[in-house]
Amino acid sequence: MRRRAIFNNKALPYLLLALQLAITLVFFFWPAGQSVYQSLFVQDAFGFRQIFVGLENYLVLFQDPLYLDSARTTVIFSVAVTLLAMVPALVLAVMSDQIIRGATAYRTLLIWPYAVAPAIAAVLWLFIFHPSIGSLGRGLNAIGIPWDYRNNGNQALLLVILASAWKQISYNFIFFLAGLQSVPRAIVEAAAIDGAGAVKRFFRILFPLLSPTTFFLLIVNIIYSFFDTFGTIDALTTGGPGRATTTLIYKVYRDGYLNLDLGSSSAQSVVLMTVVILITVVQFRFIERQVHY
């Protein structure tokens, strides 16, 4: 006969959930509701009153070429950051999972960059690639390669992609390593005995068993590239030169905080939130079919 746990205090589950629900309500639903409400208004030139304009902010938004350029930049940026953050992390996890001398020290060193704040990570990359004070930046100019990310939009975009991806590699490494260590060694050893090489063992055994971890990290990295890279962009390029590194989240900040266009900024934040939700839904709807639990 199975025993069932019975809680006489019916209010206990609600009390345990109350704090998390309150945090979610205060820091997500309430700001999201305020953004939706604010996106329906336009402030006058002096900020004393609001004028209801309905969906006009959204209509103007999608006709703005600067916003469309930011959207294209965000797509390129998010795809590049996701790939450059996940692929090297997987390679490092596979290499670190081998039985080698000093593996614990290697793993510890690879995890450290995750503790670096985005703005600090941007400053570190600035000291490396700055054309005047950066060691690598000056070296590129010395050998005849013109490097100045302050005036070249493509170089600036490349730099913020590298800095943002480097910051996220450690996070991905932790999860990939944990996933690899959860794979039964007997399966891998049996494949090796049957004559499967290291590459075949990885693609036929290890990588399919890592699909839940890969799927989780794919969602996390896309959200990271959309939102959490703001500090890196702001400290490294401030969205320039010529808006070459202005992503959607940075344009929300620039229009709302710097230009005080709260209506347009709120509309942009609502659109951005909707896009991220749709991307997540599509991933769960189609990509999760390939995941083997």
Image: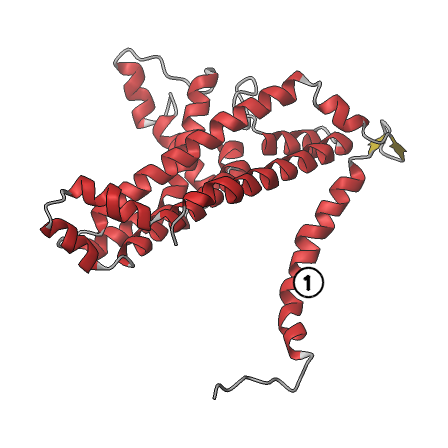
Residue farthest toward the front in the current orientation of the protein: 1
Q: How is the image coloured?
A: secondary structure
Q: Which residue: 71% across, 18% down?
A: 63
Report the label total.
1
Q: Position of residue 253 (x, y in %)?
A: 64, 34
Q: Is residue 175 left or right of residue 30?
A: left
Q: Is residue 144 left or right of residue 155?
A: left
Q: Position of residue 84 (x, y in %)?
A: 37, 34
Q: Which residue: 30% across, 43% down?
A: 90
**What residue does disc 1 label?**
22
Q: Which residue: 59% across, 85% down?
A: 6
Q: Is residue 174 above or below residue 264?
A: below
Q: Position of residue 215 (x, y in %)?
A: 43, 45
Q: Which residue: 30% across, 18% down?
A: 140
- Front residue of 283/2: it is 2
Type of residue at label 1?
Ala
Q: Position of residue 277 (x, y in %)?
A: 60, 41
Task: Look at the numbered disc 1 and give the secondary structure of its residue.
Answer: helix
Q: Is residue 282 visible?
A: yes
Q: Is residue 143 left or right of residue 155?
A: left
- Front residue of 96/105: it is 96
Q: Quadrant of residue 120?
A: top left
Q: Is residue 99 visible?
A: no
Q: Quadrant of residue 163?
A: top left
Q: Is residue 213 above or below residue 223?
A: below
Quadrant location of the C terminus in the rendered image: bottom left
